[in-house]
C-alpha cells in the first residue's frame, strides 16, 4: 500500500520534497541571520 | 557525548517542519495538476527554486533580478488564472455526495437504466453525452437546453440521442433520478494537451468535468467507445460491470 502511494505521482512528490527542503533551509538562514 | 535520544530530539523538529511543508507543496501541485495553470506554476517553481538556491549561494545581482521577476510572476499568475483558482477553491469544501434525497437502491436503479441505454447507443454507434449532477448545481447548463424533467429510463435516453431527434445535439443533465434537460451546451475543455483529433463531444465532457464536480458519461459516435469524465480526466471503461462500479463509487454516499 505504501509502495503504491509512493509511486503514484512520484514526480510531483519529488518536486514538492525538493521545494520543502529548499524553503526550510532558506527560512532557517533568515532566522539565523536575524536571531542568531 | 551526545546521546542518540538527544540527536533524535534535535532532528525531530526540522523533519516535522519539512514534512509539513512537503505535504502543503504537494497538495498545491496536485490541486493545479492537469490545468493550464500547471504549466505556468511549474515555471514559477523553477524560478522560486533558482531564487532560493542563489540566495543560499549569496549571488546578489541574480538574486535581485529573480526576486523582482518572481513578485511580478505571482501577481500575473493570480490574474491570468483567476478562473482556475476560483473553481479549485469552490471545489475544496465540497463533499462527494450524490444527494441525500435518494436511497442507494434508487441510485442503483437509475444507474442500471442509464447504463442499459448507454450500452445500446454504443452498440449502434450513436453518440451521447450525459452529465450526472453532484454537489455543484448545473443550473447554467440546464438553462441552455430544453427542459424535460422526466424519470430516467433507458428508452427515454435512447430516444433523445437517436440522430433523428431534435434534441440529440448537446448533452442531457441528470439530477437524482430525473433527466432535467436535454440539448444542453457544455463548456469545451481548453486543455492544450488534448490530442488534436479529439472530438467536440469529448471536449465538452472534459470541459464540464473540469469546471464542476459532475460525472460525465459519453459515447463516441465514431468508435462507439464509452468514456467517463471526472475532474478533467477520462476514466477508461473496460466492461459494463466496471462501468457501473465506477459510477456507483462516485455517486453513492460513503457510509
Image (cartoon, helix red, strand yellow):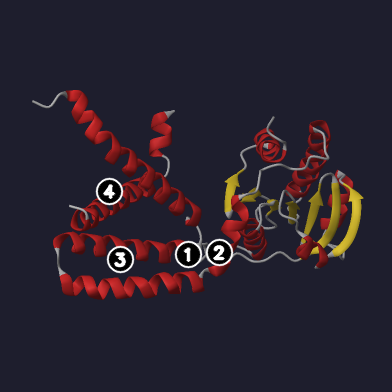
Q: Are marks 2 and 1 in contact (CB under 8 Å)?
A: yes
Q: Is residue B36 above or below residue B94?
A: below
Report the residue marked by disc 1: B37
Residue B230 coordinates in the image, percent (x, y): 62, 50
Same chain for the residues under marks 4 and 1 in the image: no
Q: Is residue B140 above or below residue B216?
A: below
Report the residue marked by disc 2: B84
Residue nearer the viewer, B57 or B3: B3
**Going from the N terminus, do you reach mark 1 or mark 3 first?**
1
User: Label 4 neighbourhood size at 10 Å, few (<14), some (14-19), many (20+)?
Assistant: some
**Residue under mark 4: which chain is it in?**
A
How far is mark 2 from mark 1, CA to CA? 7 Å
Report the residue marked by disc 4: A21
User: Label 1 neighbourhood size at 10 Å, few (<14), some (14-19), many (20+)?
Assistant: some
Residue at x-position 89% and y-position 50%: B156
Report the residue marked by disc 3: B47
Amino acid at each position: 500500500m505504501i509502495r503504491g502511494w509512493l509511486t503514484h505521482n512520484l514526480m510531483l512528490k519529488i518536486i514538492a520534497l525538493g521545494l520543502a527542503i529548499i524553503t526550510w533551509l532558506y527560512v532557517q538562514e533568515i532566522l539565523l541571520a536575524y536571531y542568531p | 557525548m551526545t546521546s542518540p535520544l538527544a540527536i533524535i530530539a534535535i532532528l525531530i523538529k526540522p523533519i516535522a517542519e519539512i514534512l509539513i511543508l512537503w505535504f502543503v507543496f504537494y497538495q498545491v501541485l496536485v490541486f493545479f495538476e492537469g490545468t493550464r495553470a500547471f504549466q505556468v506554476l511549474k515555471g514559477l517553481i523553477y524560478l522560486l527554486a533558482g531564487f532560493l538556491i542563489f540566495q543560499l549561494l549569496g549571488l546578489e545581482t541574480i538574486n535581485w533580478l529573480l526576486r523582482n521577476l518572481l513578485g511580478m510572476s505571482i501577481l500575473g499568475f493570480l490574474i491570468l488564472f483567476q478562473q482556475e483558482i476560483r473553481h479549485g477553491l469552490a471545489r475544496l469544501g465540497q463533499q462527494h455526495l450524490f444527494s441525500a434525497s435518494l436511497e442507494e437502491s434508487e441510485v442503483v436503479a437509475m444507474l442500471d437504466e442509464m447504463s442499459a441505454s448507454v450500452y445500446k447507443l454504443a452498440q449502434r454507434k450513436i453518440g451521447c453525452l450525459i452529465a450526472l449532477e453532484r454537489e455543484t448545481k448545473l443550473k447554467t447548463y440546464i438553462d441552455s437546453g430544453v427542459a424535460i424533467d422526466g424519470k430516467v429510463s433507458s428508452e427515454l435516453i435512447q430516444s433523445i440521442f437517436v440522430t433523428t431527434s431534435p434534441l440529440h445535439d448537446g448533452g442531457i443533465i441528470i439530477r437524482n433520478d430525473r433527466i432535467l434537460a436535454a440539448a444542453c451546451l457544455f463548456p469545451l475543455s481548453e486543455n492544450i494537451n488534448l490530442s488534436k483529433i479529439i472530438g467536440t463531444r469529448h471536449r465538452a465532457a472534459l470541459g464540464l468535468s473540469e469546471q464542476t464536480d459532475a460525472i460525465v458519461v459519453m459515447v463516441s459516435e465514431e468508435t462507439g467507445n464509452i468514456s467517463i469524465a471526472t475532474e478533467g480526466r477520462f476514466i477508461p471503461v473496460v466492461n459494463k460491470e466496471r462501468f457501473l462500479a465506477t459510477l456507483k463509487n462516485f455517486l453513492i454516499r460513503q457510509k
